[in-house]
Image (cartoon, grey):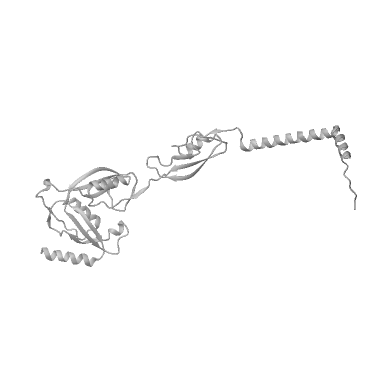
Amino acid sequence: MFNFKFDFNFILTKVKELVKSKFFWINIGAAVLAIIILWSIILLILKAYTNHGEAIKVPNLIGLYENEAEEAIKKSGLALEIVDSVYMRDAKPGVIVEQTPKQGLSVKSGRIIFLTVNARQKKTIALPNLINVSQRQATYTLNSLGFNVGSVSVVPSEYSDMVLEVKLNGTSLRAGDEVPDGSTLSLVVGRNDSIYGGEKVMMPSLFGLSAAEAEKLITTSNLVVGYVGFDNPQPANDKERSTYKVYKQIPEPHESVVPGKRVDIWLSKDGKKQQSQNKKNDDFFN
């Protein structure tokens, strides 16, 4: 075994000699200087990486189009990214409606400004069935859906204050039609009062007409289009609708009716139904 004896006095003597040595203090100074230089380099790198002390005010981009926003910030060192699209009725299509960070906040160069833009196309809403609904209720329903009610036309009818037709830019609409949000719609409302008292209208024959032809004749005869029914299979579009012909109508042809009388029609592609009904009418009037 080794016989090791700790000699404190010897160690203390060596330490004193080392402290008095010029070489020792040169090494200590060099180490401290190296630490200072290293720390300074680290600070410079961090400053360059984080843009320490550099702050850019975020501009207001709300209401601008994307290309206008890019022009507004291209010299600022910021970047843009569109992250969402929403529909806002009162904003122009395609403009910026929200930004993050907000206007006026201080950010560093290179920061991405996240944008939300207004949809370029208007939202559409399915038109509910308003036929034979009171004018007041129809107006309330349309307003609650975001539509405006413009002109109201009054035509003779069996029942007063009932909506007979809803139009957009003069075109008649059906329940379920997709209508742009915020559109102004016009109503055709029936009225039955003394100015039509005693007046009569001769019911025209609608047999063999398409739905469009029959509806036009009903309207021009001072009558009101009521139920329009198609035999199965149901037509898928307007082109197919035109191939269906009226084979039944109520009231019957040549009846004397009051102005505004509701007229119901049934249509089919079956030629036998049409011929059978035409024969019935010929027999009746001969």
* Residue located 19% across and 50% down the image: 220
Left or right: residue 179 compared with residue 74: left
Q: Position of residue 284 (x, y in %)?
A: 12, 64
State the residue in front, 64 or 285: 64
Left or right: residue 43 compared with residue 265: right
Q: Position of residue 248 (x, y in %)?
A: 20, 62
State the residue in front, 264 or 182: 182
Q: With respect to residue 11, does 265 lie above or below?
A: below
* Quarter of the image that includes the C terminus: bottom left
Q: With respect to residue 208, does 13 lie above or below?
A: above
Q: Position of residue 31 (x, y in %)?
A: 78, 36
The quarter of the displayed image where residue 203 is located: bottom left
State the residue in front, 208 or 223: 223
Left or right: residue 46 compared with residue 186: right
Query: How many numbered marks have been drawn onto this rendered protein structure?
Result: 0
The quarter of the displayed image where residue 52 is located: top right
The quarter of the displayed image where residue 89 is located: top left
Left or right: residue 223 compared with residue 113: left
Q: Position of residue 130 (x, y in %)?
A: 26, 51
